[in-house]
Amino acid sequence: MIRRKVLSLLLTTALLFSSCGVPNYFDYTTDVSFKTQNISQADGRAAIYLDPSILDRIYDGALTPIPTTPKIYLLYSISGSADSSSSSLISAFNSAYRSSINSYPSEYEDFITRNVAPSAGADTVQYALYPFKYINEEGMEAQLNAAAVITAFSADGSYEISVTRTPLANGEFVLTLNAPGYEPIQLYRYNGKAFQNGINNYETDSDDEFNEYSGDASASSIVSPQIKVYLASSVGFRSYTNFMFAKMIEIATFSI
């Protein structure tokens, strides 16, 4: 009787899994590489690297990338030159978002924040990762949501980008993203404003980078403030439920 019950349970379980479907996973073996890498941080040059064997399978039609991938995660923080905010924010991002592109936040409030003491030993300041804004074809502000162009990957598997500083009038400036397959994209702060020199310009208004953290130390305590730019990426393929994730790294700094 017990054996019959066990057999019945096994058959029921098998039917349940067959009716629900088994997830289809892409086998990312250890010899398949997908990563972000610095080329020249001083020049804001970096690359996403995808193993050429994967590219060959894409070009042969054996694999079809999800259209929004390889996803380019390009974010920034306002922080000091010698504090530990970068490593803290990078570690938190890599832990939070590596499982799926679907978990990537669409609003700045959902991005990573970390409490870090500036190098001068002042009270803790809360730093955050922020998305860039750009002006889209309709002349509206939009959060940057770019994907690397597969056909623009080089034969060695690299897709090189650069982030440079472009001056505007009145001492303001934007950062410019140059990526294969795109016209240069001017990047603004998450609130749609241009960048400026001077840390006080980032905590003056209610939507500035530091003002919402009124319980923390003033941003003026930050030593040698900089805009720090970060890059991460993920790629998924149709018919597969898992993703490859290239860890976030810092790729450029701009003094303010």
Image (cartoon, rainbow, N blue to C red):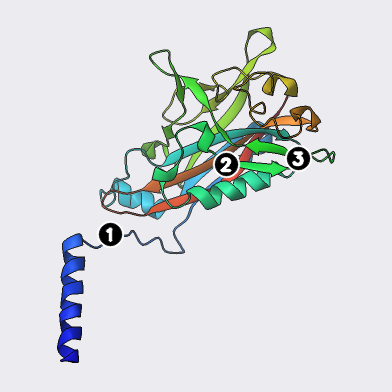
Residue type at mark 2: give it. Ile
- Residue ID for mark 2: 112
How many C-alpha atoms fall within 10 Å of the one at disc 1: few (<14), some, or many (≥20)? few
Label 2 vs label 3: CA separation?
A: 16 Å
First in residue order: circle 1 vs circle 3: 1
Does residue 198 appear in this view? no
Comparing 135 with 153, the one in front is: 135
Residue 124 disc label: 3
From the image, which quarter does the C terminus lie in?
top right
Rendering coords of residue 84 (x, y %): 73, 45
Residue name at image x 78 percent, y 32 percent: 222
Q: Nearer the viewer, mark 1 or mark 3?
A: 3
Label 1 residue SS: loop
Comparing 140 with 46, the one in front is: 140
Rendering coords of residue 122 (x, y %): 83, 38
Instruction: From this view, report whether residue 45 is shown above or below residue 173.
Output: below
Residue type at mark 3: give it. Thr
